[in-house]
Image (cartoon, coloured by chain):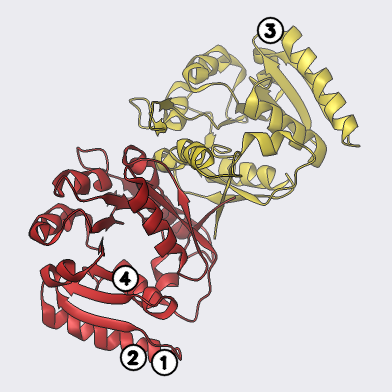
Chain colours: A red, B yellow
Amino acid sequence: MRLALLGGTGDIGEGLALRFARDTEHEVLIGSRDPEKARDAVESYEERLADAGASGDLKGFANEMAADRADVVILSVPPYYAGDTVEAVADQLDSDTILVTPAVGMKGDEDGMHYHPPGTGSVTELVAQRAPDDVPVVGAFHNLAAGKLADLSTEFDLDTLVVADDADAKGTVRQLAEEIEGLRALDAGPLANAAEVESVTPLVINVAKHNDGMHDVGVKWI
Amino acid sequence: MRLALLGGTGDIGEGLALRFARDTEHEVLIGSRDPEKARDAVESYEERLADAGASGDLKGFANEMAADRADVVILSVPPYYAGDTVEAVADQLDSDTILVTPAVGMKGDEDGMHYHPPGTGSVTELVAQRAPDDVPVVGAFHNLAAGKLADLSTEFDLDTLVVADDADAKGTVRQLAEEIEGLRALDAGPLANAAEVESVTPLVINVAKHNDGMHDVGVKWI
């Protein structure tokens, strides 16, 4: 399978790229608005993999070209770019492409981070609204500990929650997620349940901030 | 210390009563609007403890009397009664009484459970608004797996997140929570961070519904 990580040079994109490259046989396409930046990221990820005694199949492209070639497109961009990025690659998506969104709207103040969804109720639903009608949209990878994910010397035992209205697409993304070592993908229901999943992300940041030795927190549902 | 569980005959009240009675030396006062119902609950809890080879110091009272005698008052009532229950016992609270609220506003539809906070932003903040000004309010015990908590044959390893503006009260409640075996109490910051904590409760219900073998889910932050 070919996976595209649009905005794959950012925080969560970096961790997912490294883990998918190391732990799976899939081709990982790093997308960026600037293809040069994508190719630089690939070079740096390949070095990081080599340092960890691993390797992977990584290539860098402009977002549109990465989306065009991929079976699963992961929108690892900041939440305020999510809608526009979907529209920028809309012509490259079709019913055979699964669009995955991990973005979360948050705002911080002196008390901590707070969930701040768009008017659609969640970023996940905003992405579904902006995507072409026939493209299945899946919310996943929202609450991962980005630092743990990107540090290949760290083993973890964490969960990600997956929401989607399309059962096949949800199943594919859950299987894909579980190919990452130590990651379990649980079903949190339809897209309409995305807000509660997304709002865990500001919470993990607050928990990380207020508890010693928990600077990079993930979640396990037990 | 004396703990009062107002609405201690309900779901989460039952589990907390049994665990505090079994695992701590504290006197556990079960409160109900109907004192007879509180005494019946105590009798049933004592039987359950005996069945588990344990015992505890439990007494049943009307809510007002339980609140009057307690050092820590836990409002284990449904969210729509939380504000009124605080006002009903307001004269029995003072700056030496810590008021603890585990209630969460939710509504369900065909998709699942959704977070449905009051206009104050969270039930925790609503309780703080309705409590006398000098009474320290702490949010805790929101996302516990009620079934696991009430089943004394079940051992667990779960977290509860604690929010409060009063550092001393927060510290006392965190210590108290950790006297329950297998429970860790993490700091999630001030009361303003309560909404993100509360919204995990509908999420655990959705996760329980959509995943085989997870009918009573709790959370561990790792």
On whether disc 3 and disc 2 are found on a single subunit, the reply is no
Q: Residue visible at 38% across and 74% down? A: A20
Q: Distance between the residues labelled 2 and 1?
A: 6 Å
Can residue A111 be seen in this snapshot?
Answer: no
Q: What is the secondary structure assignment of the residue under circle 1?
A: helix
List the residue tagged with mark 1: A51
Q: How far apart are marks 4 and 1 (CA)?
A: 25 Å
On whether disc 3 and disc 4 are found on a single subunit, the reply is no
Decide if residue B63 is on the left or right side of residue A218. Answer: right
Asked if the residue at tag 1 contacts the one at tag 2, i.e. Cβ–Cβ closer than 8 Å, the answer is yes
- The N terminus of chain A: image quadrant: bottom left
Q: Which of marks 3 and 4 is in front?
A: 4
Amino acid of disc 1 = Asp
Q: Distance between the residues labelled 1 and 3?
A: 67 Å
Amino acid of disc 2 = Glu
Along the polypeptide, which appears first: circle 4 or circle 2? Answer: 4
Q: Which of marks 3 and 2 is in front?
A: 2
List the residue tagged with mark 2: A47
Q: How far apart are marks 3 and 2 (CA)?
A: 69 Å
- Chain ID for label 2? A
List the residue tagged with mark 4: A1
Amino acid of disc 3 = Asp
Q: Residues within 10 Å of mark 4 (few under 14, many from 20)?
A: few
Q: Nearer the viewer, mark 1 or mark 3?
A: 1
Amino acid of disc 4 = Met
Residue B76: give x, y in percent of width and height. 60, 25
List the residue tagged with mark 3: B34
Q: How crowded is mark 2: few (under 14 residues within 10 Å), some or many (20 or more)?
A: some
Q: Residue visible at 53% across and 21% down? A: B78
On whether disc 1 and disc 3 are found on a single subunit, the reply is no
Above or below, A22 relative to A220 = below
